[in-house]
Amino acid sequence: MGTQVSNAAAGPERSPFLQSHFTEMVQQFDAAKIGMWLFLVTEVLLFGGLFVGYGIMHASHPEAFKAAHHHLDRTMGALNTIVLLVSSFTMVMAVWSASVNKKKLVVLFLVLTILLAGAFLVVKYFEYSHKFHDGLLPGKFYTHQGDTVPGQFLFFSFYFMMTGLHGIHVLAGMIALTWLLRRALRGDFGAGYYGPVDLVGLYWHLVDMIWIYLFPLMYLIS
Amino acid sequence: MASYAETHAVTGPKTYFVILMLLIALTVVTVAAAGINFGEWNVVIALLIASAKGSLVALFFMHLRHDKFNAVIFVTGLGFLALFLIFTLFDVNTRKTVLPGNLKAPILEFPGAPLNKPVQPSTGTALGEALPATPAPPAAAPAAEHK
């Protein structure tokens, strides 16, 4: 009976991407989207623990956090913010291109998004190697000399845990985007089926959103 | 076959580009605002701008303005994060110290303690500083009750 309903609603051709337990593409899309949003909520709570810890430590050691944040390069941080914002734009453009059946544009915007994600990690690599060189490391690994304000290791514990976890998410996003690109090159995505592009897009925007909060909290303490 | 685009509102590239420009403008504003001294308000301003940017991303890039069902899921998640944050701050702000109650000897460097100064167990006050008007009972007494 389910098949009859879907045939009536979806026409004679059943999309090869429609899984057997769904009656039509829209239902499959909406169900997958709810799942993605639930996953994003768990991500918010994962980072939330770190944000709450940061808030407590910042409140109890304001001088140490203020002094430590001067070791960060504001220009690099702002540059990375803009790189991620633009990558969010190219991502949403990939979703839009798929929804209006422009298959070549999907490939173009996915490539741009992957390149921007790579650019973000390259900037992060230069920032990290500078910190490693100066001994600005978390907890007991902190070996920076000549501090006038004690306790700066606390800031770098949060800096590395939060930007590190975020960096891992960027890396995971790049893997997902590469998988999308492979499928887009095969011509899988069009107006009738672009769920995966949309879902990876949601994940990518959340990663962007987390950085939007990390940037002022890490780089702009004043 | 009804495609997703036919049954759901889709935002166009023009809107996306305007949102991107707004997001970049807000990034410039937040960097500029950090250079001005508003005292304690600096953090509030920075977080408000970040929230404005986050809302733009959620409403337009993540299409939440056309997606009420998933908006409820996401906002509920944020609500639980707010509960987590607010109740933790209540706890931290109403304590004199976050030192564990069964700590017996003065220690150096503990979260919430004055840095690089030995602190009194149970009160968290730095050694050498004036103790509170009513001196705290010896730490061993309340700790012993647990054992």
Image: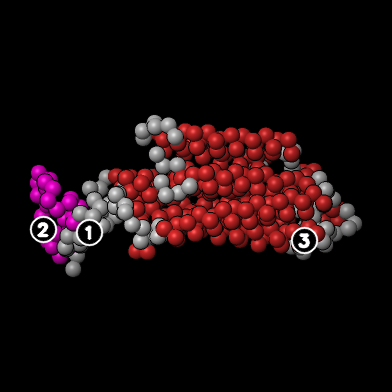
Residue A161 sits above or below residue A60 on the image: below
Q: Residue at x 36, y 46 (%)?
A: A67
Give the residue pinned by disc 2: B138
Q: Mark 1 packing: few (<14 Cα in 10 Å), some, or many (20+)?
A: some
Q: Residue at x 85, y 50 (%)?
A: B1
Residue B88 visible (yes or no): no
Residue toward you, B26 or A68: A68
Label disc, if present, on residue A183 of the rendered structure: 3
Mark 1 chain? B
To which quarter of the image does residue A171 belong? bottom right
Mark 2 chain? B
Residue type (three-letter) at the residue carrying disc 3: Arg
Q: Which residues are magenta?
A: B118-145
Give the residue pinned by disc 1: B108
To which quarter of the image does residue A157 belong? bottom left
Residue A58 sits above or below residue B37 on the image: below
**Closer mark to the observer between disc 3 and disc 1:** 1
Q: Position of residue A55 (x, y in %)?
A: 38, 47
